[in-house]
Each structure stands twice: as structure tokens, then as C-alpha cells.
Image (tube, rainbow, N blue to C red):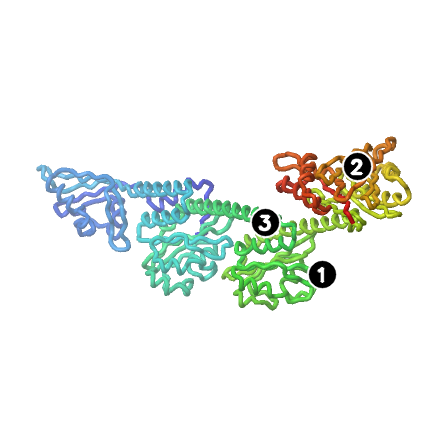
């Protein structure tokens, strides 16, 4: 007999052949009994077949002698009553045990006992007429059990409950005492796990739980390996049971035949075993009973596996989504790698390590373990090689090959593996554009190696981590480039100027990945004069940076040569208009001026080109805007700017700012605005300095925004006249 595979329709698993093997066919029985001793005078072949076959095919013998088992069942007494009373007796589905010992069987009959009279009318004997209903009775029980099991499957009852119910049903339907066991194959088909065995001793179930599949490993292990039914009629002598013979003897088991069930994908799902307490071989009805439940078992197990796979997939997706969120939570790639190790332990393995290539060396950057001691051992161990090309350890192999490596043993390099109880390792490369820049190593301390599911999940997580690291590194590099470029567009420090306190502030919009369009500068001229400029270039990024550089460099180049601020601004405008079209970055607004310290204060001449109005904060805490007409730069060259002159007396300040400061919005969408800026300035104490004004303004804007990122760059330049 080969392994049992599922049939096309699992709801109709009973084949006619299996039914006939289990229940036979309906038969009519007849016997004529004479006298008070109920001597068998005649009977049809069906009667003798029903009561025991050839050994009992005899006439002229009292029924009680031919079938002694009937006496204690009360059947001889019923015959006596009919003989004495002369009244017939009829019964439906009457249960009768036929035969004795191991050959006994349970049977059901519809029958009638009719008195047979002589010519004088006296009762001379009894006619027995009946129909055996055993097959119908058992079929009803079988269908009821099948229906109950299918209902359990539909309502998604636990698999253990379904298999236990199936085993009990088979034990109840079997004609002889039988003990049923179901062992479930694991995903890779190499081991069998306890499924159900309601009548086997607990110690026996525990002992065989997890046995391997293979030749010579009992009936079940061998059946799963061969993928066909294995019959052992005498456990005590069969070589397949050498390793389990004493265990079977303790459990009182003498015979076992096991059938593997094969799923629709061709994999072994489980083994279905029937044990007997005496040595014997299976009859057709034993094997047929196993077959009729095969499809139900396959349906239940495959349904369970589908639900398990669905739950596992949902758990994997949840794990990966959570881990991905954690991996992307920090733009520091070293923190990202530590989050990777933390995500792996203990979900994928108890111990996790991340090593990366750092120039010619390998650097351990992240570890995770259940205890601080174990984590210290991992962190304190340095990879046993000098570079990725040395091929000394598992890490170097993975770096060189960019391929996954796993082993069911301690890693090859010298490490604290025995102290940690490591039994297997898994190394997965972290790839950036196909090149390994690091290795994620998982270490298990259990008795089972990494399975395919864990390997696949780890590879997926490693890909996500590598992408997060790539993004982190790109962000870090781009932010550093933007900072460096921005630093080149701003003065490295403000020069000291007699009788003048100077402070500035610059903050780019967003996360600092682009060069901002706001700028300021302060540089010396001849004759104790200084030039100052603060402006705003339309746009961001490289084109805005190029425009900013054009404005600053033009101003620094022409300011020493031109005597008036308006001339310098016209020169800047001409430089912007002379740019090739491909380099256009829009218009520019700015305030440019010259200042000269005097004994009376700071004399200033300034020009405004479309920019926000400069603010004069006097010693009475009054803010007055300095209006000076002037058009945007880089658009037209026809409107000359107007020059304004003023003097800052000691204690007075000139505040220049870009609109990024006043256009900051809070989370309600409200702008900070010019009015709030004036209120902050007027509310400051008299002893203010330039730096204090800058700090107060920027803090007020920050508090107003309540954490909402700024949409535009911010630049601020404060000039405060001093007494000395």
C-alpha cells in the first residue's frame, strides 16, 4: 500500500471498496431451530458466514453449543420465551457480539423469532429470519463522525482537537481494540511531532515526539521516509523497532502499521499509525478505516498549515514594518545598524552582531544579546582578520562573496562562542549597489539550526537595513556638502569694528540638505569704513548658491572701487543680468550699506533693493522702519535705487532680516509677522547688545512655531552702536 494522497473532493472521501472492506454487504440470514434445545436443523450460507464461517457450519447441534457467547447476551433466553409462549419476537438494530477472543466481532441485526408448530399445533421449533444491519449502523456512525470532524474544520477548531476526535472515532469504529496515533511532519519533513494519541501512555507520546524521519526509525519514521505504508506485525522481532522496542514493551504495544499522508504539494503531512496490544497483521478493514479518514485528516492539516502560514506571514510583515520604521528613525547610520542588531535579538536569534568595512579594517559597530554579560563578550571580540580579503572567518567569506553563509557549528574564527553556548551561525551581507559593506551575523544557542524561514526573513531585514544605511550615508554626505557649501557663502566670522557690536544668525529651511538662498556679509573697506550686506535669493540649491556667490563676490570686488552704495548695487544688478540664461535663478532682494565709526556714533549709508525694511531700534525702545525705494535685482536695470543715510547713536541698533523670520508659521497656520517682531524688539531691556537681540528674536520665533519646521531660510544681522 502506498502513501495516502488527497482525493479531488475531500467532502466525499468514502470509496465503495473501502466501505465494502469495512462493512461488507447487507445479507439476509435464515435458520430453522427444533426443540427446546434449539438444535440447528438447517440454515442458509449467510447465517453460517455471519456466525463465524466454516468452523461453525454445522447442523444437528444445539445453538448454545454452536454459539456459546449467545447465552450471556440473553439471546438463548429470548428463544426459550418464544418456544414456551408461542409468540413471535421482533427486534431492530439488535447488537450481538459474534465469536470469542480476538476473532470476536460486533454485529447488528433486524430479526424475527417465529414459532414453528407441528400438526397438533404445538410449538416444535423456531424460525430465525433476519437481515444484518452492521454495515448500515457503522456507516451511519462513520458519516456522523466525518460530519462532526468537517464541522470542526469549518469552524477552525484547533488542529489538536480535530485530530484527537478523529483518533477516538477510529478507535470506536475499529472492530478490534486499536490505539491510534497521529504524528505531524515539520515543515522540512525531517522530524515528526506529536499530533494526537488519546489512548497511548503519556510517557510514550513524549518519547516519540520529535523523532526523525528515516529508514529503520520505527513504523512512523520509516513510513514518512519511504512515503508508503509500513506494516510491523510483531514489534518484538522487527528490525525497524530496534531502538524503540523497550519503549513499546513498556507501553504494552505489540504491532503497528503506519501510513503517511501526502499533501497536495507532494509533501508528507503526517503519519497515521494503528497500534495493537497483540502481534497481528492488518486486515482489509483496518487499512480501509485508515483510508476513509485520510482526506479529512489532510484537509484539517492543510487548513491548519494555511492558517499557520497566514499568521506567520502577518507576524513577519508586522515585524518587518516595525523594524523598517525603527531603521528609518535615525539618520545616523551607526544608530541604524544598532537598531538592526536590536531588532534581530531575540526574535530571529538570541545573539546578533554587525560588522562593517572601515578602510582596511573591519569594525564591530553593533551587538545585541539577552544579558549585559553576553553583549560585553560580543562587543569585546574583534574579528580575527585584518581586512575583507583575508578569508579567515565567516565574516570575511561573506564580505568577499557577498553571499549568505550558514553553519550548524561554532564559527571558524577565534571568539567567545563556547562561552556563549553558540551552536549555529547565520551571516547575511549588507549590500550597497551589489558591494558588501558589512555583515549581519546571527548566533543561536538552541538545538536547532536556522531554518529557511528565518534565513529568508533575515535576508529581507538585511536588505531593508542596507537601504536605510545607504539613505543615512547619503543624507550625511549631502548635509555635509550643503554645510560646507553654505559655509563658503557666509563669512567665517564677523570682523571686530570699533564702537560697534555685531551679531548674526543663519538657519536654512528643512533638514539642511540644500544650500539656502539667504546670505549676509560684513567686510572692511578703506578709510575706516566697512561694507555690510544681507539678502535673499529666490530659490534654493545649486542655482541659488551660484547666485549668492555672484552677489557676494561682486559686492566684495566692486565695493572698494565705487564710492557710493547705490553704485555697488547697480554693479550687482548688472552682474546678475549678464548671467547666461541657463544659470538664471530668479531675482534677488538685499540691503547693502557702508558704515563708519565716529565719536558721535556709527554713520551709515544704505540702499534697499526690494528687501524687507531695515528696523532702527532707538534708546527709547522705539522701532522705526528705514524706508528706501529700490527694485528687485536681476529683473531690470532701469530703476535706480535710493540711498538713505542715518546715524546710530550709542545704544541704538539697526536690525536687518529676511522674510523667512517673519513668515514662520505655527501649527495653526498663523504667521509670526512683522508686528510680533517689532513687539519683541520694543520689549527688550535697555542694556541689550547685538547678540542678545539675535538670541531674543530667534527664541521668540522658535517658541511661536512650536516645533513646526520652517519653510524658508532665515538670516538676521544686527548692528549695535556702543560708547567705546
Q: Which residue is mark 1?
A: 359
Q: Are marks 2 and 1 in contact (CB under 8 Å)?
A: no
State the residue in front, 519 or 421: 519
Residue 326: which numbered mark, if any?
Answer: 3
Q: Earlier in the sequence, mark 3 or mark 1?
A: 3
Residue 589: which numbered mark, if any?
Answer: 2
Q: Is residue 716 left or right of residue 109?
A: right
Q: Is residue 100 left or right of residue 563?
A: left
Please identify the residue farthest to the right as the structure is shown. Answer: 561
Q: Position of residue 264 (x, y in %)?
A: 50, 46
- Give the vertical position of 441 relative to 558 (above or below): below
Q: Are marks 3 and 2 in contact (CB under 8 Å)?
A: no
Please identify the residue farthest to the top as the structure is shown. Answer: 638
Q: Is residue 575 left or right of residue 471?
A: right
Mark 3–mark 2 Cα distance, whole angstroms, equals 43 Å
Image quadrant of residue 518?
top right
Q: Secondary structure at mark 2?
A: strand
Image quadrant of residue 274?
bottom left
Residue 705: which numbered mark, if any?
Answer: none
State the residue in front, 722 or 454: 722
Please identify the residue farthest to the left as the structure is shown. Answer: 120
Amino acid at each position: 500500500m502506498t502513501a495516502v494522497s488527497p482525493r479531488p473532493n475531500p467532502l466525499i472521501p468514502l470509496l465503495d471498496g473501502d466501505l465494502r472492506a469495512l462493512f461488507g454487504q447487507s445479507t439476509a440470514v435464515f435458520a430453522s431451530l427444533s426443540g427446546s434445545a434449539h438444535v440447528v436443523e438447517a440454515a442458509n450460507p449467510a447465517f453460517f458466514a455471519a456466525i463465524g464461517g466454516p468452523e461453525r457450519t454445522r447442523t444437528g447441534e444445539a445453538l448454545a453449543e454452536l454459539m456459546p457467547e449467545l447465552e450471556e447476551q440473553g439471546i438463548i433466553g429470548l428463544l426459550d420465551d418464544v418456544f414456551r409462549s408461542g409468540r413471535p419476537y421482533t427486534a431492530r438494530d439488535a447488537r450481538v457480539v459474534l465469536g470469542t477472543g480476538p476473532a470476536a466481532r460486533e454485529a447488528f441485526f433486524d430479526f424475527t423469532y417465529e414459532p414453528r408448530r407441528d400438526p397438533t399445533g404445538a410449538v416444535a421449533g423456531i424460525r430465525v429470519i433476519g437481515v444484518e444491519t452492521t454495515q448500515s449502523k457503522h456507516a451511519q456512525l462513520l458519516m456522523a463522525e466525518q460530519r462532526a470532524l468537517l464541522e470542526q474544520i469549518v469552524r477552525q477548531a484547533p488542529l489538536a482537537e480535530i485530530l484527537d476526535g478523529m483518533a477516538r472515532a477510529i478507535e470506536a469504529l475499529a472492530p478490534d481494540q486499536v490505539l491510534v496515533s497521529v504524528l505531524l511532519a515539520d515543515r522540512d519533513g525531517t522530524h515528526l511531532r506529536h499530533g494526537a494519541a488519546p489512548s497511548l501512555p503519556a510517557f510514550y507520546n513524549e518519547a516519540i515526539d520529535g523523532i526523525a524521519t528515516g529508514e529503520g526509525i520505527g513504523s512512523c519514521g520509516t513510513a514518512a521516509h519511504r512515503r508508503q505504508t509500513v506494516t510491523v506485525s510483531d514489534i518484538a522481532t522487527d528490525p525497524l523497532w530496534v531502538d524503540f522496542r523497550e519503549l513499546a514493551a513498556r507501553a504494552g504495544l505489540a504491532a503497528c502499521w503506519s501510513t503517511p499522508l501526502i499533501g497536495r504539494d507532494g509533501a508528507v503531512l503526517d503519519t497515521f499509525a494503528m497500534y495493537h496490544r497483540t502481534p497481528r497483521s492488518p486486515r482489509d478493514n483496518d487499512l480501509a478505516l485508515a483510508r476513509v479518514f485520510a482526506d479529512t485528516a489532510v484537509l484539517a492539516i492543510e487548513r491548519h498549515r494555511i492558517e499557520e502560514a497566514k499568521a506567520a506571514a502577518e507576524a513577519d510583515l508586522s515585524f518587518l514594518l516595525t523594524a523598517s520604521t525603527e531603521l528609518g528613525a535615525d539618520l545616523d547610520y551607526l544608530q541604524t545598524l544598532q537598531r538592526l542588531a536590536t531588532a534581530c535579538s531575540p526574535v530571529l536569534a538570541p545573539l546578533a552582531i554587525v560588522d562593517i568595512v572601515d578602510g582596511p579594517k573591519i569594525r564591530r559597530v553593533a551587538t545585541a544579546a539577552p544579558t549585559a554579560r553576553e553583549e560585553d563578550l560580543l562587543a569585546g571580540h574583534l574579528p580575527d582578520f585584518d581586512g575583507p580579503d583575508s578569508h579567515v572567518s565567516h565574516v570575511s567569506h561573506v564580505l568577499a562573496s557577498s553571499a549568505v553563509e550558514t553553519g550548524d557549528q561554532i564559527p571558524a574564527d577565534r571568539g567567545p562562542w563556547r562561552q556563549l553556548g553558540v551552536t549555529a551561525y547565520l551571516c547575511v551581507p549588507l549590500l550597497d549597489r551589489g558591494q558588501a559593506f558589512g555583515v549581519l551575523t546571527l548566533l543561536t544557542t538552541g538545538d536547532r539550526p536556522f531554518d529557511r524561514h528565518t534565513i529568508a526573513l533575515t535576508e529581507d531585514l538585511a536588505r531593508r537595513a542596507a537601504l536605510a544605511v545607504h539613505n543615512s550615508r547619503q543624507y550625511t554626505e549631502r548635509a555635509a556638502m550643503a554645510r560646507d557649501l553654505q559655509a563658503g557663502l557666509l563669512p567665517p566670522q564677523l570682523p571686530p569694528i570699533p564702537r560697534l557690536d555685531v551679531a548674526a544668525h543663519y538657519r536654512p529651511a528643512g533638514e539642511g540638505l540644500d544650500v539656502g538662498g539667504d546670505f549676509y556679509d560684513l567686510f572692511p573697506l578703506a578709510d575706516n569704513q566697512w561694507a555690510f550686506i544681507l539678502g535673499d535669493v529666490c530659490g534654493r540649491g545649486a542655482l541659488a548658491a551660484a547666485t549668492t556667490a555672484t552677489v557676494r563676490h561682486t559686492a566684495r570686488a566692486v565695493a572698494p572701487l565705487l564710492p557710493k552704495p547705490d553704485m555697488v548695487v547697480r554693479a550687482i544688478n548688472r552682474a546678475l543680468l549678464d548671467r547666461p540664461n541657463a544659470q538664471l535663478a530668479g531675482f534677488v532682494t538685499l540691503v547693502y550699506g557702508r558704515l563708519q565709526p565716529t565719536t558721535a556714533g556709527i554713520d551709515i549709508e544704505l540702499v534697499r533693493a526690494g528687501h524687507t525694511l531695515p528696523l532702527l531700534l532707538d534708546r527709547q525702545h522705539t522701532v522705526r522702519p528705514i524706508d528706501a525705494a529700490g527694485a528687485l535685482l536681476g529683473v531690470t536695470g532701469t530703476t535706480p535705487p535710493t540711498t538713505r543715510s542715518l546715524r546710530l547713536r550709542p545704544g541704538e541698533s539697526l536690525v536687518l532680516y529676511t522674510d523667512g523670520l517673519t513668515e514662520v508659521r505655527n501649527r495653526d497656520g498663523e504667521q509670526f509677522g512683522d508686528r510680533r517682531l517689532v513687539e519683541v524688539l520694543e520689549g527688550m531691556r535697555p542694556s541689550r547688545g547685538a547678540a542678545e537681540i539675535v538670541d531674543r528674536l530667534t527664541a521668540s520665533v522658535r517658541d511661536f512655531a512650536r516645533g513646526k519646521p520652517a519653510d524658508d531660510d532665515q538670516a538676521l544681522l544686527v548692528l549695535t552702536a556702543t560708547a567705546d
